[in-house]
Image (spheres, helix red, strand yellow):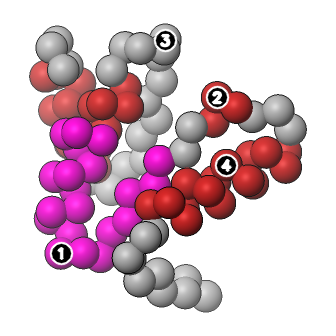
Amino acid sequence: MCGLIVERAKIKRHIANNRCIRIYGQRNFGKTSLVKKVLAKEWQNKSQGNRLVVYVDLFAIIDENSVYTLITKGINESAHGFLIKSCL
């Protein structure tokens, strides 16, 4: 997590202002660690159990169907023990 202090602060500011963010970069530069180990824990702790963080590795996309499959898999794995309310 070395060298990501500025990035972490920027991301936290965007989240606090309900802004969408995209984190991208070369492989093995700490993107997932930044989200999983730092930001997601803080975000979930403040939500009192009302937020679900979903991780989807899109590296394996080969077609439109694989996008659906990977997103569904990410939601199912992340939602273990989490009550999902209908948004409709």
Callout 3 amino acid: Gln
The residue depicted at 38 percent of the width and 57 percent of the height is: 53
Look at mark 4 in the image and give the residue it sits on. 70
The numbered mark, 3 or 2, whose residue comes first in the sequence reads: 3
Look at mark 1 in the image and give the residue it sits on. 48
Q: Nearer the viewer, mark 3 or mark 4?
A: 4
The numbered mark, 1 or 2, whose residue comes first in the sequence reads: 1
The numbered mark, 3 or 1, whose residue comes first in the sequence reads: 3
Residue 42 lies, in percent from the top left, at: 16, 52
Q: Mostly what secondary structure, the magenta segment?
A: helix
Q: Residues within 10 Å of mark 3 (few under 14, many from 20)?
A: few
Residue stretch rendered in magenta on the structure: 36-55
User: In whole angstroms, how far apart are the C-alphas of marks 3 and 4?
Assistant: 20 Å
Residue 16 falls left or right of residue 63: left
Look at mark 3 in the image and give the residue it sits on. 26
- Is label 4 in a helix, a strand or a loop? helix
User: In whole angstroms, how far apart are the C-alphas of marks 2 and 4?
Assistant: 10 Å
Quarter holding residue 23: top left
User: In whole angstroms, how far apart are the C-alphas of marks 4 and 1?
Assistant: 27 Å
The residue depicted at 37 percent of the width and 26 percent of the height is: 31
Q: Nearer the viewer, mark 3 or mark 2?
A: 2
Callout 2 amino acid: Phe
Can residue 3 be seen in this snapshot?
yes
Q: Residues within 10 Å of mark 4 (few under 14, many from 20)?
A: some
Residue 61 falls left or right of residue 29: right
The numbered mark, 4 or 1, whose residue comes first in the sequence reads: 1
Verify CB contact (< 8 Å) between mark 3 and mark 4. Answer: no
Q: Is residue 73 above or below residue 79?
A: above
- Is label 3 in a helix, a strand or a loop? loop
The residue depicted at 33 percent of the width and 69 percent of the height is: 51
The residue depicted at 38 percent of the width and 65 percent of the height is: 52
Any mark on residue 59, and which? 2
